[in-house]
Amino acid sequence: MRFTQEAGDEVEINVIPLIDVILVLLIFFMATATFDQQTRMKLSLPEVSDVQTQADKRESLVLQISADGRYFVGSNEVINARIETLKEALQRFAGDDRQQAVIVRADASAQHQFVVTALDALGQLGFSQISIATVRADAESE
């Protein structure tokens, strides 16, 4: 049995179905990926024995403080830890709305000075509705 190839036939591999499958998978992964600001920076929040009722869930300004002193306003990192830079970032993010609720999410192992600097910047800008995020302590740890 002898297979012969004629001179005019060319063998080719069709990659178009492969490209279609790859694009469908890419679109699937892009659509199902979660983009959450809280997953960007891992925080270990301080614990409290009893959790008070939370304020209404309208749009709040979230200020995150990492253990090493980095600040995040919304989902954007502040360039440096100076109070002037933090105030500029807060003004840019909040605009003129000083009645907006602010949630400070500071890592439990962050230095006290980082939290005080953030509260000082918020106070100088005129924010009055400030909350500090905590988690409920487990019953086993009591």
Image (cartoon, grey):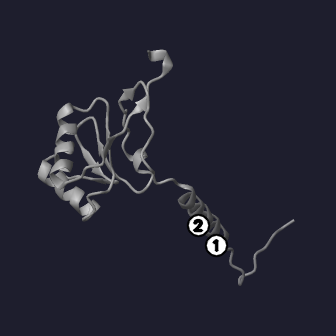
Q: Residues within 10 Å of mark 1 (few under 14, many from 20)?
A: few
Name the element at disc 1. Answer: helix
Count the marks: how many? Answer: 2
Residue 110, compared with residue 32, is above or below; it is above
Q: Quadrant of residue 141?
A: top left
Q: Quadrant of residue 20?
A: bottom right
Dividing the image into 4 quarters, which one contains the C terminus?
A: top left
Looking at the picture, tell me which residue is in the foreground, 30 or 71. Answer: 71
Instruction: Write the residue at 42% across / 24% down.
Output: 49
Q: CA distance from mark 2 to mark 1?
A: 11 Å
Q: Position of residue 124 (x, y in %)?
A: 15, 51
Q: Position of residue 84 (x, y in %)?
A: 12, 53
**Rendered image: mark on residue 86:** none
- Residue placed furthest toward the bottom: 8
Q: Residues within 10 Å of mark 2 (few under 14, many from 20)?
A: few
Per the image, the residue denoted by label 2 is: 23
Name the element at disc 2. Answer: helix
Q: Looking at numbered disc 1 in the image, what kind of residue is underneath it?
A: Ile
Instruction: Write the residue at 24% across / 43% down.
Output: 70
Q: Position of residue 46 (x, y in %)?
A: 35, 30
**Closer mark to the observer between disc 2 and disc 1:** 2
Residue 122, compared with residue 110, is above or below; it is below
Q: Position of residue 119 (x, y in %)?
A: 21, 43
Q: Looking at numbered disc 2 in the image, what kind of residue is underneath it?
A: Leu
- Residue placed furthest toward the right: 1
Per the image, the residue denoted by label 1 is: 16
Dividing the image into 4 quarters, which one contains the N terminus?
A: bottom right
Q: From the viewer's perspective, is 4 left or right of 87?
A: right
Which badge, 2 or 1, comes first in the chain's sequence?
Answer: 1
Looking at the picture, tell me which residue is in the foreground, 63 or 34. Answer: 63
Instruction: Write the residue at 33% across / 42% down.
Output: 131
